[in-house]
Amino acid sequence: MIKFTKSKLGALLLLFMTACFLMQRISIIQYQNRNNSNSVFLEILHPTSVHSINGQKKYEDFSPQLTTSETKSVACMVFNGRLGNLMFKYAFLHIISKSKNLYPILPENFELSRYFYLPEYESQEQNSRRQDCDKIKEREIERWSCSYDDKFTNLTENKAVYFHGYFQSWKYWTKYEDEIREMFTFNAEIREEASDKLLHVLSEMGYADSSDDVVVGLHSRRGDYLWKAAKEFGYVTPNETYYLNAMAYFRNKFPNQRVFFIAASNDINWLRGKLGREENIYFMENNLPFIDMAILSLCHHVIMSSGTFGWWAGWMSRGTVVYYKHLYTPGSSFSTTFRGGDIGDFIYPGWIDLA
């Protein structure tokens, strides 16, 4: 029978622990070498995703990384506002987290999760890591709500951060536009309801679903924009002249086709009173906001008014979008949310301005 002294047992235990450590280090080094040199192997297991940006294909590598969600620092956001505002905030948080190697935290019972599939919201770590946001005392505050703020590109990677702002610029995620479009695809239930309602309305209007017919969504934002405080702040909402000019624009753009208009508004009675005599127009009523947005996004083209709701409906349609050129009252507080008064960071390239 072999007998071991305490000193010999200690030496054997130390040798065993050293061997385990070396095996772990060798495994990590082999993984890193394989990750760097055997790209063909990784391509087979984890194919790259192809995105089309401005007509050019971009490839984004989704190969596994040693950093996991447990080791990433959190990115938190003050989520407030309604549907359009929440979409801008989430798009920014998703992309900045991706570029800075952070783990984005979303609120419990997040409204957007009822309409879209959000990969972070489905993560099991969300509940356990929300408390990490409470440990962050400072806030990263945007300089302009409606313009691109390049200071966020200089943020330290994998350092916890808490954002406060609206981040209403397409420039934050222009390199990932296809990814944002995929995420902001309404879930199957909403798509089905919106599609059924739109087809029902169009059939009543005599729509033939052919190349001879064009469907244009029209959104009018009024309501809170008419409040005294909103006007003093600098918010502007278009009058009927803008909508009539926008409708005329599309009729002139498609002179040999029938143009149908599907209108949504938070003041539908006002809109009907101003545009009710126009040909081939239908005024939607009693829909929830996300259904209205889904219906407008299914149209070929969109006429938007003020605010972010119509912005997203137009962007999601991928068609021609007409916008009201006077987005703010000159010299107002709201005008300062556009860097130098320039609306180019907010308005998507190629959209048509009218008044």
Image (cartoon, grey):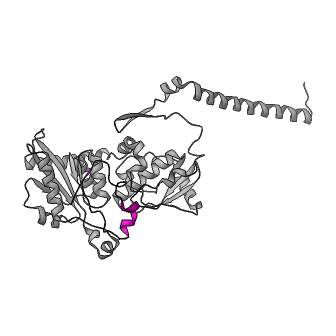
> Residue 215, can we see it?
yes
Residue 195 percent across, percent down from the top left: 21, 46
Residue located at (36% from left, 52% from top): 114
Which is nearer the eye, 69 or 173?
173
Q: In this view, does 310 lie to the left or right of 96?
A: left
- Dominant SS of magenta comes to loop
Which is nearer the eye, 87 or 331?
331
Quadrant hosting residue 247: bottom left
Residue located at (55% from left, 56% from top): 161
Q: Is residue 121 left or right of residue 261?
A: right
* Quadrant holding the C terminus: bottom left
Which is nearer the eye, 189 or 335?
335
Residue 167 percent across, percent down from the top left: 42, 57
Which is nearer the eye, 19 or 336?
336
Q: How many marks on residues?
A: 0
Q: Give the range drawn in magenta.
A: 331-353
Is 342 in the magenta? yes
Residue 175 percent across, percent down from the top left: 42, 42
Q: Residue furthest bottom?
A: 228
> Residue 111, can we see it?
no
Residue located at (39% from left, 54% from top): 169
Is 245 in the magenta? no
* Quadrant holding the N terminus: top right
